[in-house]
Image (tube, rainbow, N blue to C red):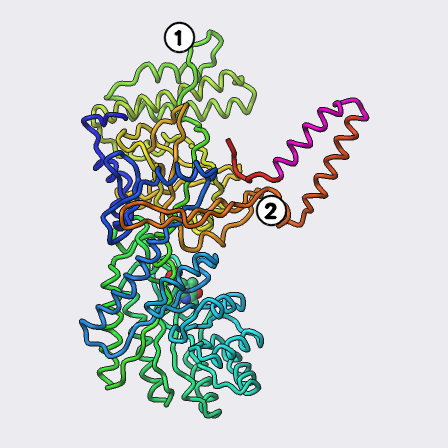
């Protein structure tokens, strides 16, 4: 084992990657320098590297999505316990009942776990489409658990929900548009069921953060105040005020500021009180999602963070609801939240291997400048020779200028290919020397603050951003990412990550960095020839799996689920093979058998034309068929 150098410790590693911030107690570093998972409760921890070697022994290769069942259970328990505690402390006279929004991760195994772990809290499900309602109706067993139906509903959707009510489930239709009530009215009359109704509010409150446009007057969904009165009047006319029991809003996901959460609860509770006065039966306030995850561990109102704890969230919600209803002496309702992100984010880690690196290093530089070199190259050479700690800024400026000019002259044919290559090498070498001087002499030059941002390598990761981290690409979501091992060594390089799609967007170049809002590169270790280098992308359990797409036909990764036992051992609960090339070709409507047949006849033509022998054809066909059945990612 590597000896840790005196000036580098596990503490330093933990600090530069911020793992003790965003890790929320679930992730940490072991004395061996490996990332470990700690399932709450037991003090035991499991090294991700041990899980990886267990996987490899079973023939499961990276990239792989690792799910840790305990962490979902733990988050679900914390949410329910926190509300319970707040309710008890404040003597609130209602209860809390959560529903999990299926859209956050519809994978059967995830929903099964939620149904199983959630049963003891009567944690229900939220459905936003017919397909999701079908999942909810099959997966929820206790009629005490709630089912909340949001989204646009057609006749079939409504019939499904009404069947559920007939079966004894508390299945709410949340009315999102004024016309929806008419359809619900018609279908419930036809089936002879009294529906459970809710109304989705359009609040004037808006939340800062990424989803700020989901709230406010311009939000896509929900009834305006006057539409709400119209719907309530229609419900009244039909004699169905006893059916109207729930108010719902969803301000957006990942709300970083507790003030916005309080404001939305306050406004909603005012609507609630008014509904009671209108004669509606009521009994439920549904606060939607929005409970944030601290992706960067900064505990601030930055969009990738949150400035509140779970206990503060629960206490504030209960406090605000109580305050307003107590003023009017109204009964305390059941509080529902639809937290998805906060429950699921921690439970999955994407693990990939680094295939190669493009180092930011100067290529070979000769002993002397070649005789025919143009003036510009000569200047660049002299700049390199003359760097001292007194003229750093000047040398840097000159290097930038001469390199740019060399590139220009190349375009005009005045600089040759080899001269341009030498110019680029000299430039990199100058930047490296400047940086080394700055660090050695501890020079502070504000103009060169972001010089470090130029000095990164590109590490090629065996994964697809589009398949596995769609939010990183689509909405610039920052996920904490770090090497899974080698933390006894000080990272000696900085890198950004490119995936294997060869799309210029297929990269990760924004990182958790507590010194600036967002880091532009990540400290990493030099690659070794004889050793894999594994990177983990954390907190990817929410939204990433089914939002991902088949860009470049890179398919689903392998998925492995583990359960960590009390004694610190772990079990492989489930393994799911990722998509094969055969699978992804079928998704885009190819008939793989037909492709094989076509390739076979192409090869036959080559035999006829004497380009290859029949034996060569046979070997080629075998390769072709093996490939089509293989993994879509880089295989070793
Ligand atoms: C997406 C969504 C949620 C989940 O929000 P999180 O921020 O992930 O908790 C809840 N309710 C509705 C209506 C949603 O659309």
x and y, in percent, of residue 471 in the image: 44, 51
Q: Is residue 396 above or below residue 17?
A: above
Disc 2 is placed on an element classified as: helix
Describe residue 443's horizontal placement relative to residue 336 as left or right.
left
Q: Is residue 130 above or below residue 332?
A: above
Residue 603 lies in the magenta stretch:
no
Ligand 1's quadrant? bottom left
Q: Is mark 2 within 8 Å of ligand 1?
A: no
Q: Give the class, few, some or many, for how many residues have Cα within 10 Å of label 1's Cα (few <14, many ≥20).
A: few
Question: Which of the 4 image quarters holds residue 92?
Answer: bottom left
Residue for badge 1: 367
State which quarter of the image contains the N terminus: top left
Q: Is residue 443 above or below residue 81?
A: above
Residue for badge 2: 583
Residue 612 lies in the magenta stretch:
yes
x and y, in percent, of residue 90 in the image: 19, 73
Q: Is residue 205 above or below residue 597?
A: below
Describe residue 132's horizontal placement relative to residue 378 as left or right.
right
x and y, in percent, of residue 153 in the image: 53, 73
Region in magenta: 608-628
Can the viewer see residue 214?
no
Disc 1 is placed on an element classified as: loop
Magenta-drawn stretch, dominant element (helix, strand or loop) = helix
Question: Marks 2 and 1, Cα distance to the nearest angstrom?
Answer: 55 Å
What residue is drawn where x is 40% and y is 39%? Answer: 54
Name the residue nearer the viewer: 287 or 427.
287
x and y, in percent, of residue 315 in the image: 23, 68
Mark 2 and mark 1 lie on one chain; the one further toward the N terminus is: 1
Q: Give the class, few, some or many, for how many residues have Cα within 10 Å of label 2's Cα (few <14, many ≥20).
A: many
Describe residue 406's horizontal placement relative to residue 478 as left or right.
right
């Amino acid at each position: 084992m590597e000896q840790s150098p005196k000036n580098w410790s596990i503490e330093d590693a933990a600090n530069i990657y911020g793992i003790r911030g965003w890790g929320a107690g679930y992730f940490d570093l072991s004395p061996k320098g490996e990332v470990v998972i700690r399932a709450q409760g037991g003090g035991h921890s499991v090294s991700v590297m041990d899980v990886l070697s267990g996987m490899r022994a079973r023939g499961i290769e990276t990239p792989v999505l690792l799910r840790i069942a305990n962490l979902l259970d733990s988050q679900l328990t914390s949410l329910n316990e926190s509300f319970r505690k707040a309710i008890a402390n404040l003597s609130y006279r209602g209860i809390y009942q959560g529903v999990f929004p299926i859209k956050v991760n519809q994978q059967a195994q995830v929903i099964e776990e939620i149904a199983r772990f959630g049963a003891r809290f009567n944690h229900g499900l939220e459905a936003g489409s017919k397909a999701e309602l079908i999942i909810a109706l099959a997966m929820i067993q206790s009629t005490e658990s709630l089912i909340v139906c949001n989204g646009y509903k057609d006749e079939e959707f409504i019939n499904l929900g009404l069947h559920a009510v007939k079966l004894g489930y508390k299945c709410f239709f949340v009315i999102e548009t004024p016309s929806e009530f008419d359809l619900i009215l018609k279908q419930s009359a036809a089936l002879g069921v009294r529906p459970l109704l809710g109304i989705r509010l359009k609040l004037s409150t808006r939340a800062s953060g990424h989803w700020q446009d989901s709230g406010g007057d311009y939000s896509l969904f929900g009834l305006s105040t006057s539409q709400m009165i119209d719907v309530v009047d229609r419900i009244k006319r039909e004699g169905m005020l006893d059916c109207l029991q729930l108010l719902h809003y969803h301000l957006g996901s990942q709300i970083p500021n507790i003030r916005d959460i309080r404001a939305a609860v306050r406004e909603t509770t005012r609507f609630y009180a008014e509904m009671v006065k209108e004669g509606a039966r009521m009994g439920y306030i549904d606060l939607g999602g929005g409970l944030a995850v601290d992706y960067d561990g900064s505990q601030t109102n930055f969009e990738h963070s949150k400035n509140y704890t779970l206990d503060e969230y629960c206490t504030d919600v209960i406090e605000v609801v109580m305050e307003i209803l107590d003023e009017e002496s109204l009964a305390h309702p059941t509080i529902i939240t639809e937290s998805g992100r906060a429950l699921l984010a921690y439970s999955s880690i994407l693990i990939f291997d680094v295939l190669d690196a493009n180092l930011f290093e100067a290529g070979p530089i000769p002993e002397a400048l070649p005789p025919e070199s143009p003036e510009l190259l000569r200047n660049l050479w002299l700049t390199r020779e003359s760097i001292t700690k007194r003229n750093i800024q000047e040398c840097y400026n000159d290097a930038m200028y001469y390199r740019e000019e060399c590139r220009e002259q190349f375009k005009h044919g005045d600089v040759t290919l080899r001269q341009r290559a030498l110019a680029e090498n000299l430039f990199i070498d100058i930047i490296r020397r400047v940086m080394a001087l700055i660090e050695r002499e501890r020079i502070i030059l504000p103009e060169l603050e972001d010089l470090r941002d130029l000095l990164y390598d590109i590490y090629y990761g065996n994964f697809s951003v589009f398949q596995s981290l769609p939010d990183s690409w689509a909405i610039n979501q920052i996920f904490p990412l770090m090497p899974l091992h080698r933390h006894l060594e000080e990272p000696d390089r900085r890198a950004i990550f490119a995936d294997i799609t060869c799309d210029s967007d297929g990269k990760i170049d924004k990182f958790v960095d507590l010194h600036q809002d967002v880091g532009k590169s990540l400290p990493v270790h030099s690659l070794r020839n004889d050793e894999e280098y594994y990177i983990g992308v954390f907190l990817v359990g929410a939204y990433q799996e089914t939002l991902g797409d088949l860009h470049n036909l890179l398919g689903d990764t392998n998925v492995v689920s583990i359960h960590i036992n009390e004694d610190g051992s772990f079990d492989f609960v489930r393994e799911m093979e990722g998509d094969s090339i055969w699978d992804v070709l079928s998704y885009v409507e190819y008939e793989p058998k037909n492709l094989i047949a076509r390739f076979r006849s192409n090869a036959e033509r080559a035999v006829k034309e004497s380009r290859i022998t029949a034996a060569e054809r046979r070997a080629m066909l075998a390769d072709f068929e093996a490939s089509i059945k293989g993994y879509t990612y880089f295989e070793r």
